[in-house]
Image (cartoon, rainbow, N blue to C red):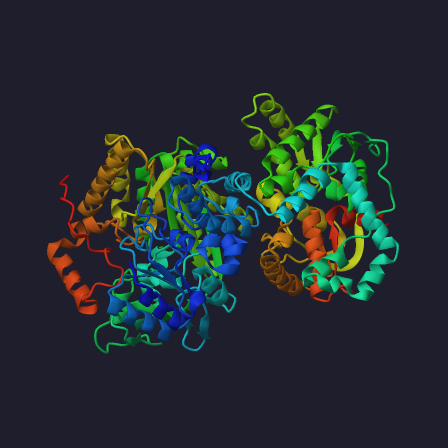
Amino acid sequence: MISDSFLNRLKDILGPSHVDHSEAGLLTYAYDATPNFQSKPDVVVMPGNTEEVSKIVKLCLEHEVPIVPRGSGTNLAAGTAPTQGGLVLLFNRMDQILEIDKENLTATVQPGVITQTICETVESQGLFYPPDPSSMKISTIGGNINENSGGLRGLKYGVTKDYILGLEVVLPNGDIIQTGGKLAKDVAGYDITKLLVGSEGTLGIVTEAILKLIPKPEHKQTLLAVYQSMDQAAETVSSIIAQKITPATLEFMDQPTIGAVEEYAHIGLPTEAEAVLLIEQDGPQAIVENDIEQIADICEKHGALEVTIAETEQEANQLREGRRAALSAIARLSPTTILEDATVPRSEIARMVQAINQIAEKYNVGIATFGHAGDGNLHPTCMTDARDEDEMERVEKAFEEIFAHAIECGGTITGEHGVGEMKSPYLAWKVGERGLEAMKNIKTAFDPHNIMNPGKMFAKDTKKRITI
Amino acid sequence: MSIQTDFQDRIEENELLNCMRCGFCLPACPTYIETQNEVHSPRGRIALMKAVRDGEIETYEQVEESLNVCLGCRACEPACPAGVNYGHMLEEALAIFNEHHQPSMKEKAARRTAFNHLFKNQKRMEQATSLLSFYQKSGLQKTTRKLGFMKLFPKHMQQMERVLPKMSKRKREPEAHFPAVGGVKATVAMFRGCLMDTLFRETNRSTIQLLNEAGCDVVVPDTQGCCGALHGHSGEKSGATDLAKKNIEAFESVDCDYIITNAGGCGAFLHDYDHLLQDDDEWSERAKAFVSKIVDFTTALVDLDFTEKSLNIENHRVTYQDSCHLRNVMGVSQAPRQLIHAVSGAHFIEMKKADHCCGSAGIYNLTQPEMSMQILDHKMESMMETNATTIITTNPGCLLQMRLGIEREGLTDSVRAVHLADYLLEALNHQ
């Protein structure tokens, strides 16, 4: 609980209209997109600039009040759920694109800008910001930086961390620091920029960022291939990469997903098919056309039942429709949808998908898998009901086994959603006890009083590692 | 019964749980965009309804305020991956609050006049609008404007007064049958609506003429009344149910392939009659049969190849403002655009965020004037970027709101707002 004097001092710093502690306000900032982690904060604040953020942090440090920085609250691992109460920090008043620098190919932005707004703004000037998480229509760049968000274009273009050149950060003691700069090369000291990216709000508060931009690709083409077996689809993926072609996106859906999509959208997918690949290439027109032709050949060689190349943007949209509808189709089938992001090396995809289907059967839970085949980032998605305790227990066990399997294959427990609170009991499985210790030491060095997003990343106890 | 137990009985837990709080509704919600506050977002409102149901919130006024600020435009529904039926929950929640309310005497009287009196009874609506007609024609309107009498009212009410359409002199034709021109392709029944039948009677005539030209025999059942949307959206559920039954009966009396609407707001509410009456054993099947026949006039015209007709208006720039309920509830967004594209001389410029609500939303612009005007001003910014001289809509509320926007921006000399039916008739006659 926070005291009246704490509240009054917040109001002095921000003005009363930017401090919300109404019952409805606290309730609607009590959650993110993760099921079962609702917990009310004590206050919600909307700072307008970096100095105000710094003052808030100093005040919170003095009173030992937890701070949960929050973009649009789309996190899927309870990373932005205020599970220890405290203060939720919003950035909707810090939502400006400050500069687009065409000479250095950078954009300087405030944390509250919506990712899609950045993409549209730079693209209108012939530039390109590639990271494209599925939530980009509403997610903020501050959230993307703190979660090191991925997206569909990860295979060819990388993820958020590959496009952050510099940051302005308010540290947990209230100090304001600048890291990096408009520089391709900079080895002055530790790379704190990269350390902060993906730190899930546990080390400091990003208040400004310099993004790297690249020229916008001139042309794009889309292809859809349908397979009788998951193995054939996986071989196709490996073969495309072996031919030294790197598609912009390489997405797949498994049989349960195809079934759900077809039932929902009726777009003519063969429901007996075991896998569908959606492939896109971008770049100079001649190269794109050549690549897509080669990819089509490879698909056919590996036994694709059907290969469709879009001739127009409208046709491309129709081909994308199925993959785009995947989450909707699955989400409609049950009250609770749990979307995970176990990730494996590309070469292990077929094995992993098979394992997921066997695990789902073993625990008698419904799991459909789709995701980014190009970079091995899978989205096994569980259709369940949070009120059914018995089933929720089996769901948890199934996911534990999926995590263990992913690690066994040389993969990870999370490719792009983050650890948050939900996956914190499993972090040591991936990084090891010593690795976890090293991370905790970094956390303590930055935030000795543990006020920054406490309870996230590091769990009280690690789950007992299951062996396969 | 307490409010909480009513929520438990009448708002389905499954539907509330269906919201996975992914946040995909946020960029579609006009009030979230304006306020940047989760309290005024669809996922926030669902969380608040759930909190009432689960007994996790005590300050009901804050919940009610959040629901009242909602436009009810339902743009969140197509954006929702999980297919949550937000609109149905909103109406039920408003109805529950309304039933538990101790409204002030003044509010009671105003509601009684509007809902039990005016909208429920077509004759009274006509009398009220003939008063309006008298006021406009008699010169009284000019006098009151000159005297500045209207200055006593809030600014946007004065502007509203200026944009009300001139009443038609035309009496509603007594005959209820309008034969197709050429061969008969379909027999349709026309839902005339109450606002459309009074303030916009000319538009109803245009719609019937277009349908006739497209090969429809049109019948207009006489015992039909208001659709009940304004009641439903304001929590007056029992009034809405009475009207629904009356309309179903009226249309059962005629033999038709389709029931045609030309107002998105009414069409969507008629489209939801099966939900409204789902627990009524006597009426649920009849409601389903009624709903299966509801078709918007734009869909009907496109299906009947009206776009092949020779349509022409001299060179002009035109844009289209979606009716939220036509788009989000009836799922109609392409047909109106196809029809505008069929008019030679029309340079169609798609307005940014044409699919976002204009802030009219039934009587919202009267109950939440501040938010409504904020939304309208942003809408007009997008409109002006198109440089269009004609704005087309498919719903009377949107049409009045667009005219209000034009008036507020001082563009009355250069920009007009018209209903698509009137626009198409103009194009058809312009040979």
Left or right of A367 on screen, residue B387: right
Task: Return the residue nearer the eye: B124 or B302.
Answer: B124
Give the total of numbered labels: 0
Q: Give the percent coordinates (x, y) of residue A461.
A: 15, 49
Left or right of B244 on screen, residue A468: left
Residue B370 is drawn in which quadrant? bottom right
Residue A386 is drawn in which quadrant? top left
Left or right of A324 on screen, residue B156: right
Task: Return the residue nearer the eye: B320 or B428.
Answer: B320
Residue B380 against residue B66 in the figure, above or below = below
Task: Return the residue nearer the eye: A96 or A292.
Answer: A96
Task: Return the residue nearer the eye: B53 or B244.
Answer: B53
Left or right of A100 on screen, residue B98: right
Asked if residue B42 can be seen in this view, the reply is no
Outermost residue on the front side: it is B105
Residue B291 against residue B335 in the figure, above or below = above
Q: Give the percent coordinates (x, y) of residue A371.
A: 35, 46
Q: Give the percent coordinates (x, y) of residue A133.
A: 39, 55
Outermost residue on the top side: it is B282
Q: Give the percent coordinates (x, y) of residue A268.
A: 49, 35
Residue A145 against residue B123 in the figure, above or below = below
Q: Which residue lies at the image location 33% right of the left edge and 76% below the top edge?
A: A181
Residue A122 against residue B128 in the figure, above or below = below
Asked if residue B325 can be seen in this view, the reply is yes
